[in-house]
Image (tube, helix red, strand yellow):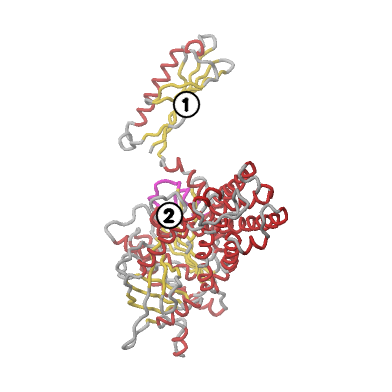
């Protein structure tokens, strides 16, 4: 795509026939003149000594066929524009003083990029969502003008507020299920890139907050309603009867009980310490939805004094004047039901464990085969082990790549499920207790004895993740902390294989890999892969780059390791002595040196921005304007710090786009 803008100035002395009289145009008027077969703007303005015509191509003209017009584009534009300018100049006997033509190669997508930016921005989503919910609530104020509900309107504000909040809750009940339809999202993710489908869990939480708020409003309004019904005798029922004998009151209290348990156990600390508690209580959404679907069968909003039975047929539909939210609520519930059935069918397809490896810090690697599973680097899956629990499914990142003959995940033993899973696989604390000489910092492969079998695994997935989009950038920054490096294991393995294949990645020019660990033993299981990747990167770059591992070179992969563990004097001296006279780092055995302490992302990103803008970062970039993808897997506290650094260090030409891995 080529962007064209044209500016032409024509000066006419005031003593000569004015342009306005010669052409019929008045000063300071916008009219249309031909420009490359289109109609563009022409602005007339007046100064003290002469009239000036500004011939401007506005809005900008886009030429689609860039290759066909590459050589003749500038000549064509100047020729056509100049002829038009001269034609109008002669009309008013003026002189053409200047014709300026600007052309710039641009992408069409940024011309509409304001749409994704508005949608992706979390604050914008929250604002728009909250605004929509408030408008839905206020829309129910029209009830006060309904003649059929004149009797119910005696309750005034409490009934109007409760009904408005009820409509919002009905919409929330539909929306809260959609982000959990992961297979549907996985289908749309590569097709609808401008929609932030990777933020589905975040959106699920925002809808949950909205549902909680409007539940409080709705419940408070109805408690006031029931009290006023008994006091005003609008209906011959006591408040206690409405609360505990009618469908609306009974189902409402069932939903309140479910909400109480689901929300209290959904706290992040509870999920981390006892995921099982969160998992089981969150499945109270089933009775919650059933209560929601039948909540209106009590027909509190009706035009009769006497109760109306939901089994009364046509009489019920004629006199029960609710908004029948079940019609759209069932859409979300039905989609999720289809999702769960599909997951169960897919998860039960054959899976065979081929190797189990115990890594330092209680990490266990599981390698398995599942022929029916096709995945991409950076994706994740759900794992279930019936011998541990038939109903618990836990998310794990896929650490293998599509070129490997197996699928692997790394499991860190931090909860009841993961410890029980490791025990079932023969690499847990029960087995470690049997061998006193077992080094907790070592790596061991589990060997089966005669007659032993590995437990059955059920695998549901894969599911999409932001890491899939690494290859869409010229520059990608991969950041991992501790076990959070697992997504990048798959990505880096895939890069290694792709660069050796006949079709290496064309757009991706540089990968900056940043790994932050507490201790040196954390590097061990990943060290072999990093070494091979580093050697491949250096071998494919210029020969002079071998001796400059820490300088800006054209190597494809740059590795930055950070060690946050405090060291005593003896350890520090030992590292210094082992570093003398060698090109390898004594801790990681990589060419790149280990950094001590936490990385300063403001400094790192700022230096990268400056080198990209001055053209010294790497050769082969399409321009000095770049969008750098920053991908992070780790704790939320570090994510907020990196996100802030990306925002503050971005410039007009270099944008740092931040994505965090969610499961």
- State the image quarter where residue 641 is shown: bottom right
| Relative side of 215 to 428, left or right | right
Residue at mark 2: 475
Residue 34 against residue 663 in the figure, above or below = above
User: Residue 131: x, y in percent?
Assistant: 59, 47
Badge 1 marks a residue whose secondary structure is strand
User: Residue 197: x, y in percent?
Assistant: 46, 55
Residue 142 against residue 468 in the figure, above or below = above
Residue in the image at 48% along x and 64% along y: 633
Residue 619 on the magenta segment: yes
Q: Is residue 604 visible?
A: no
Residue 380 on the magenta segment: no
Outermost right residue: 231
- State the image quarter where residue 272 is shown: bottom right
- Mark found first going from the N terminus, 1 or 2: 1
| Relative side of 301 to 344, left or right | right
User: Residue 532: x, y in percent?
Assistant: 36, 68
Residue 243 against residue 628 in the figure, above or below = below
Residue 568 against residue 127 in the figure, above or below = below
Q: Is residue 528 visible?
A: yes
Residue in the image at 41% along x and 71% along y: 383
User: Residue 570: x, y in percent?
Assistant: 55, 80
Mark number for residue 56? 1
Q: Which region is colored magenta?
A: 606-625
Q: Residues within 10 Å of mark 1 (few under 14, many from 20)?
A: many
């Amino acid at each position: 795509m080529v962007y064209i803008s044209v500016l032409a100035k024509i000066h006419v002395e005031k003593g000569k026939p004015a342009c306005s009289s010669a052409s019929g145009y008045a000063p300071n008027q916008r009219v249309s003149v031909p420009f490359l077969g289109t109609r563009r703007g022409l602005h007339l303005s007046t100064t003290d000594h002469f009239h000036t015509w500004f011939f401007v191509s506005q809005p900008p003209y886009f030429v689609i066929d860039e290759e066909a017009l590459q050589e003749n584009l500038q000549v064509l534009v100047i020729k056509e524009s100049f002829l038009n300018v001269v034609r109008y100049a002669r009309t008013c006997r003026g002189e053409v003083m200047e014709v300026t033509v600007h052309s710039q190669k641009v992408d069409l997508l940024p011309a509409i990029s304001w749409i994704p930016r508005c949608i992706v921005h979390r604050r914008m989503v929250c604002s728009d969502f909250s605004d929509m919910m408030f408008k839905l609530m206020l829309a129910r104020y029209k009830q006060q003008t309904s003649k059929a509900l004149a009797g119910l309107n005696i309750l005034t504000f409490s009934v109007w507020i409760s009904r408005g909040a009820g409509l919002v809750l009905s919409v929330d009940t539909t929306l809260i299920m959609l982000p959990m339809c992961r297979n549907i999202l996985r289908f749309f993710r590569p097709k609808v890139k401008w929609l932030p489908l990777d933020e589905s869990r975040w959106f699920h939480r925002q809808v949950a907050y909205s549902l909680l708020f409007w539940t409080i409003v709705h419940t408070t309004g109805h408690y006031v309603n029931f009290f006023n019904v008994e006091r005003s005798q609008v209906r011959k029922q006591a408040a206690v009867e409405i609360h505990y004998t009618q469908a609306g009151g009974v189902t409402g209290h069932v939903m309140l009980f479910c909400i109480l348990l689901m929300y209290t156990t959904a706290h992040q600390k509870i999920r981390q310490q006892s995921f099982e508690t969160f998992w089981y209580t969150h499945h109270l959404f089933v009775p919650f939805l059933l209560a929601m679907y039948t909540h209106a069968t009590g027909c509190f909003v009706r035009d009769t004094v006497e109760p109306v039975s939901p089994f009364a047929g046509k009489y019920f539909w004629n006199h029960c004047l609710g908004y029948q939210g079940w019609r759209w609520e069932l859409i979300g519930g039905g989609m999720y039901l289809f999702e769960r059935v599909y997951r169960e069918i897919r998860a039960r397809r054959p899976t065979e464990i081929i190797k189990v490896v115990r890594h330092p810090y209680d990490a266990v690697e599981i390698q398995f085969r599942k022929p029916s599973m096709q995945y991409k680097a950076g994706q994740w899956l759900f794992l279930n082990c019936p011998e541990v629990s038939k109903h618990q499914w836990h998310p794990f990142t896929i650490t293998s790549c599509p070129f490997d003959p197996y699928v692997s995940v790394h499991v860190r033993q931090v909860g009841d499920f993961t410890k029980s899973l490791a025990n079932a696989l023969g690499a847990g604390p029960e087995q470690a207790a049997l061998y006193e000489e077992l080094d907790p910092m070592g790596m061991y492969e589990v060997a089966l004895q005669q007659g032993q079998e590995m437990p059955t695994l059920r695998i549901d997935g894969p599911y999409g993740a932001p890491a899939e989009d690494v290859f869409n950038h010229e520059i990608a920054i991969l950041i991992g902390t501790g076990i959070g490096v697992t997504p990048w294991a798959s990505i880096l393995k895939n890069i290694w294989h792709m660069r050796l294949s006949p079709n290496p990645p064309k757009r991706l020019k540089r990968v900056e890999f940043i790994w932050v660990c507490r201790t040196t033993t954390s590097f061990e299981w990943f060290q072999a892969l990093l070494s091979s990747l580093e050697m491949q990167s250096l071998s494919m770059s210029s020969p002079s780059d071998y001796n400059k591992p820490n300088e800006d070179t054209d190597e494809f992969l740059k590795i930055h390791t950070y060690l946050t563990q405090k060291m005593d004097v003896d350890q520090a001296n030992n590292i210094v002595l082992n570093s003398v006279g060698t090109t390898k780092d004594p801790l990681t055995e990589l060419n790149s040196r280990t950094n001590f302490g936490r990385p300063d992302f403001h400094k790192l990103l700022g230096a990268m921005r400056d080198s990209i803008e001055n053209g010294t970062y790497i050769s082969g970039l399409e321009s000095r304007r770049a969008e750098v993808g920053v991908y992070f897997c780790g704790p939320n506290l570090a994510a907020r710090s990196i996100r802030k650094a990306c925002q503050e260090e971005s410039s007009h030409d270099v944008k740092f786009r931040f994505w965090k891995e969610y499961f």
